[in-house]
């Protein structure tokens, strides 16, 4: 349910607004959601706003959310807007509701760190949400521009020390926060989408090489010799050169991976050295989430993770996978799937599907887009016509002119797969 405001224009040109409590219901006939009024509060005036504030305060006492709502109830003028001291209190209430403050304080025990490190980390998160800036600018923002609960001021050194602490306890904190969010939002974690991207850094050189294992973690070293010889490792910096998805292979980069639920809620984020290949990453991701007590999971990924070894690994533990692959990849499995006869079933106007079983435990769902097929066919016809026009009587040209013609010819037609 939600509160909405509707406007009604009178004959004299004045506009009267009404407040209503509504919720969305699905209309099976119109095949869309529509708003249904639960209760009408009447005109949007000062009296009704005061009544709404009393209702919100009553609900907050019942749900024990008063610390979250108290700052929002300070200003009641419609023309006023919440100052920079209001929103941090809202974020802090959410921070506490997710149990992040208690988790950080627990992990701080026994460490030679300022007890305010938890408050500094919250301040950095609030800064990232409200006014993204550097650590130095964030410390000034906290000390001069906003009111952070429990932290009157801080320094850039304290911010850097808190970030070092966060890096150490990141896995334990991510697990704790995920379970809190899963319970709070009643998340369904039976379907996980995973993909990677890369981001580059504008610097002249890559990081100094560090011995790493197959998971990209630094290994102990001595005299330039890797100590753990059993690990399948390599030597590279974290920010290093690799295949850039931003087409900036000339700059050092890192690889970032993220797993999200079907609603798009992040489960966990990973980062690897910039030269890490996608093919082996999903096995590490599944291994890292093994102890998170997730239920039966279906992994969704793209063709970069479709090796036979990855598919076998994803099936372990009663898990399943959905991997998208373009049929123009020319793999043996895609050719075998295309060669099987069968009738397509129409899902919608621009989508037809056909299920093909290739091996035990694996199946292909071939998707066909008629609109894309027509568009690709028209593009191929135009390209072939242009090529025929360009090569007509070209045998009468001199070798030099033919070379010029070859250099100016249009690119080969891209046979966009109409099946994915």
Image: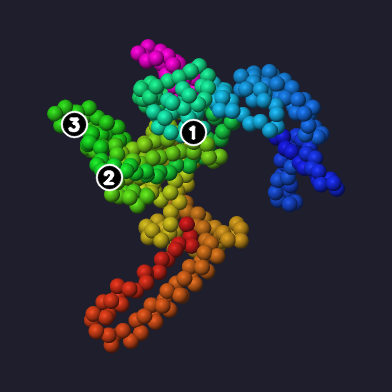
Q: Quick one: label 3, few (<14), some, or many (20+) residues within 10 Å?
A: some
Instruction: Look at the magenta stretch and give its main secondary structure.
Output: helix
Residue 241 is marked as 2
Nearer the observer, 14 or 148: 14
**Residue 364 inside the magenta-drawn segment:** no
Residue 233 on image: x %, y %:
24, 36
Q: Is residue 233 visible?
A: no
Nearer the observer, 316 or 237: 237
Residue 218 is marked as none
Label 2, label 1: how far apart the Cα atoms are: 31 Å
Between discs 3 and 2, the one toward the N terminus: 3
Residue 131 is marked as 1
Residue 30 on image: x %, y %:
73, 52
Vertical side of 167 occupied by 342: above or below: below
Q: Is residue 416 left or right of residue 58?
A: left
Residue 76 on image: x %, y %:
70, 26
Vertical side of 117 occupied by 126: above or below: below
Looking at the rendered image, the disc whose residue lies closer to the viewer, 2 or 1, is: 1
Between discs 1 and 3, the one toward the N terminus: 1
Q: Quick one: label 2, few (<14), some, or many (20+) residues within 10 Å?
A: many
Helix, strand or loop at disc 2? loop
Q: Residue furthest right?
A: 11
Query: Image quadrant for the N terminus?
Result: top right
Q: Quick one: label 1, few (<14), some, or many (20+) residues within 10 Å?
A: few
Q: Is residue 204 left or right of residue 25?
A: left
Label 3, label 2: how far apart the Cα atoms are: 22 Å
Q: Is residue 53 visible?
A: yes
């Amino acid at each position: 349910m939600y509160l909405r405001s509707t406007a009604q224009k009178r004959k004299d040109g004045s506009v009267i607004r009404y407040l209503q409590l509504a919720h969305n219901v699905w209309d099976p006939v119109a095949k869309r959601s529509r708003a249904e009024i639960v209760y009408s509060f009447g005109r949007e005036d000062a009296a009704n706003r005061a009544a709404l504030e009393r209702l919100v305060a009553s609900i907050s006492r019942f749900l024990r959310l008063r610390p979250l709502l108290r700052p929002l109830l300070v200003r009641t003028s419609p023309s006023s807007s919440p100052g920079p001291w209001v929103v941090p209190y809202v974020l802090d209430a959410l921070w506490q509701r997710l149990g992040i403050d208690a988790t950080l304080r627990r992990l701080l025990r026994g460490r030679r760190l300022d007890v305010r490190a938890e408050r500094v980390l919250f301040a950095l998160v609030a800064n990232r949400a409200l006014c993204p800036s550097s650590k130095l600018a964030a410390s000034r923002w906290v000390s001069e521009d906003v009111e952070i609960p429990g932290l009157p001021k801080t320094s850039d050194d304290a911010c850097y020390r808190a970030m070092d602490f966060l890096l150490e306890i990141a896995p334990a904190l991510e697990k704790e926060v995920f379970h809190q969010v899963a319970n709070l939002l009643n998340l369904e974690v039976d379907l996980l989408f995973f993909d990677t991207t890369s981001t580059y850094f504008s610097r002249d050189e890559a990081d100094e090489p560090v011995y790493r294992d197959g998971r990209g973690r630094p290994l102990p070293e001595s005299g330039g010799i890797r100590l753990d010889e059993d690990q399948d490792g390599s030597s590279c910096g974290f920010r290093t050169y690799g295949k850039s998805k931003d087409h900036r292979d000339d700059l050092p980069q890192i690889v970032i991976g993220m797993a999200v639920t079907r609603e798009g809620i992040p489960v966990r984020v990973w980062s690897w050295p910039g030269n890490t290949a996608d093919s082996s990453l999903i096995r590490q991701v599944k291994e890292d989430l093994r102890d998170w007590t997730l239920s039966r999971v279906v992994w969704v990924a793209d063709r970069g993770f479709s090796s036979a070894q990855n598919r076998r690994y994803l099936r372990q533990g009663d898990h399943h996978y959905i991997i998208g692959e373009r049929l123009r990849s020319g793999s043996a499995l895609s050719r075998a799937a295309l060669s099987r006869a069968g009738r397509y079933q129409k899902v919608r106007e621009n989508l037809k599907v056909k299920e093909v079983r290739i091996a035990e435990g694996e199946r292909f769902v071939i998707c066909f887009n008629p609109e894309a097929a027509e568009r690709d066919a028209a593009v191929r016809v135009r390209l072939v016509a242009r090529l025929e026009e360009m090569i007509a009587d070209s045998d009468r040209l001199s070798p030099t002119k033919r070379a010029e013609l070859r250099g100016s010819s249009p690119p080969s037609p891209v046979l966009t797969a109409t099946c994915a």
